[in-house]
Image (cartoon, rainbow, N blue to C red):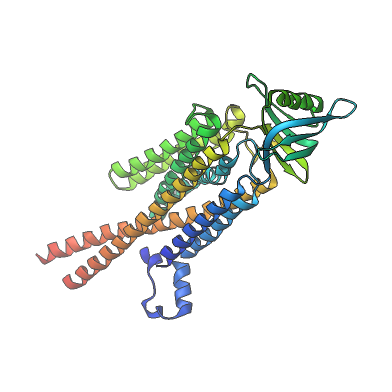
């Protein structure tokens, strides 16, 4: 009984967390087309702006720790930290702007933490896989614990019966 | 041996005795696991940020990596229990080895399954022949081989000794899995924890802490399942023993 209650509580927690996760999975992320790239005198990227699908414009500062994962027209991916290649970062974003290739930005307090090529529809597609990972794992554990518990109960019953038989015989 | 599971009939209505009984039944491990799992789920879906490169599927890390760690740790524990069995010859260590192997197999299977599901959207394939995947698959087969040997070899001390030797040989795979991503740089990222930790591959603090809480949660669940399987093994042995006694008593009576 206690075990069943605990398992029910766990299942409830999973459902709650899953619901929270579905609403939280886009938090901190903005996707859209690059509309402006700002450089300093040395040609290094300092800020950029994007317009999202609702038409709202977002401006992001970049810092030394900003990470890039951007693809060219051929699909070759370029990854770097801002501190290592600030000029190339500006050039890559301008290339995205020219091609209207959308990017996804994760940001904190107006500063971009990462700027990556947006892969359309991928987050939605991924949710099914994510659900599968959690569902398969917990279903397997529930099933295994259930089977082991039932086996234990059967064995306890057999032991009691055999002991009774022994007592009768003796 | 199975008295671990027995409750005190005289204390059924006494809350203190019920608490003691709960502790002795090891259900507190399940309760702790439930609490830690709920905490892990909250941290994974609400507290930890969404990773920009992979999106939502990256949250699989909070299941896949802890399950993989526990699976590898189970193999190390199996080797340790086997060594102790070979040194002492006590049946309890053999039972514990069997319980650990079976639980390790469940964790190993889930490590592979969750990895396969995660690989599809991120790598574009369900499976590749890269080093870490291959050595992890070998770990799974080692568990299968160990348990098949125990199932099909005639019971007795020889089976237990040979099983212990198989476990020791199988444990060699564990460090290879750990270092595989560093030794053969392929699809898997380099190691992020332990002596071979690659600082370039470090994860953010929120992701790292959530992963560690997940690992503790799965470790507690692992302990609970091992205890339950150990009790079952003890009960199975007791049933065999009692059957022998009943048979002998009835034969004597006839």
Horizontal side of residue A63 vs A158, given as left or right:
right
Residue at position x 17%, y 61% from top? B248
Q: Going 46% across and 42% down the picture, which residue do you hit?
A: B108
Residue at image coords 58%, 42%: B56
Residue B114 position in % (x across, y down): 49, 40
Expressed as whole percent of the image width and height from the top left, the position of residue B93 reads 42, 52
Q: Quadrant of the N terminus of chain A?
A: bottom left
**In which quadrant of the rendered view does residue A105 lie?**
top right
Residue A164 occupies quadrant = bottom left
Q: Is residue A149 visible?
A: yes
Q: Position of residue A72 (x, y in %)?
A: 67, 22
Q: Residue furthest right?
A: A41
Residue B153, visible in the rendered structure = no
Looking at the image, residue B131 sits to the left or right of residue B166; the answer is right
In the image, residue B214 lies at what x, y percent? Answer: 57, 51
Residue at the left extreme, as displayed? B254
State the residue in front, A46 or B151: A46
In the image as oriented, which residue stretches furthest toward the top?
A: A74
Quarter of the figure with residue B194: top right
């Amino acid at each position: 009984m206690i075990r069943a209650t605990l398992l029910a509580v766990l299942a409830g927690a999973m459902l709650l967390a899953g619901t929270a996760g579905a609403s939280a999975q886009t938090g901190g992320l903005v996707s859209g087309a690059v509309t402006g790239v700002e450089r300093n005198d040395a040609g290094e990227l300092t800020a950029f702006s994007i317009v999202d699908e609702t038409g709202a414009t977002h401006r992001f500062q970049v810092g030394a720790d900003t990470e890039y994962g951007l693809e060219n027209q051929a699909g070759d991916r370029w990854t770097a930290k801002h501190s290592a290649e600030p000029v190339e970062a500006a050039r890559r974003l301008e290339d995205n702007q020219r091609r209207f290739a959308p990017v996804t930005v994760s940001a904190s307090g107006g500063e971009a933490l990462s700027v990556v090529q947006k892969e359309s529809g991928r987050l939605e597609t991924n949710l099914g896989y994510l659900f599968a990972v959690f569902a398969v794992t917990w279903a397997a554990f529930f099933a295994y614990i259930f089977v082991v518990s039932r086996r234990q109960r059967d064995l306890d019953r057999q032991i009691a019966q055999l002991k009774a038989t022994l007592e009768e015989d003796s | 041996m199975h008295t671990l599971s027995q409750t005190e009939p005289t204390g059924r209505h006494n809350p203190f005795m019920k608490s003691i009984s709960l502790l002795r039944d090891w259900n507190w491990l399940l309760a702790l696991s439930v609490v830690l799992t709920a905490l892990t789920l909250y941290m994974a879906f609400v507290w930890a940020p969404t990773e920009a490169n992979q999106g939502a599927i990256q949250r699989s890390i909070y299941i896949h990596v802890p399950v993989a760690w526990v699976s590898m740790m189970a193999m190390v524990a199996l080797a340790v229990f086997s060594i102790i069995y070979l040194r002492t010859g006590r049946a309890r260590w053999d039972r514990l080895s069997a319980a650990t192997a079976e639980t390790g197999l469940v964790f190993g299977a889930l490590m592979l399954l969750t990895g396969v599901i995660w690989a599809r959207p991120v790598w574009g394939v369900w499976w590749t022949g890269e080093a870490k995947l291959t050595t992890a698959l070998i770990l799974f087969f080692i568990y299968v081989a160990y348990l098949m040997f125990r199932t099909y070899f005639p019971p007795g001390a020889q089976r237990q000794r040979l099983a212990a030797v198989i476990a020791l040989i199988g444990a060699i795979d564990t460090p290879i899995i750990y270092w595989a991503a560093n030794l053969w740089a392929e699809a898997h990222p380099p190691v992020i924890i332990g002596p071979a930790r690659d600082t370039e591959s470090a994860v953010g603090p929120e992701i790292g802490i959530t992963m560690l809480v997940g690992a503790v949660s799965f470790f507690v669940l692992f302990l609970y399942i091992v205890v339950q399987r150990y009790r079952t093994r003890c009960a199975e042995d007791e049933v065999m023993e009692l059957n022998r006694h009943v048979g002998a008593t009835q034969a004597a009576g006839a």
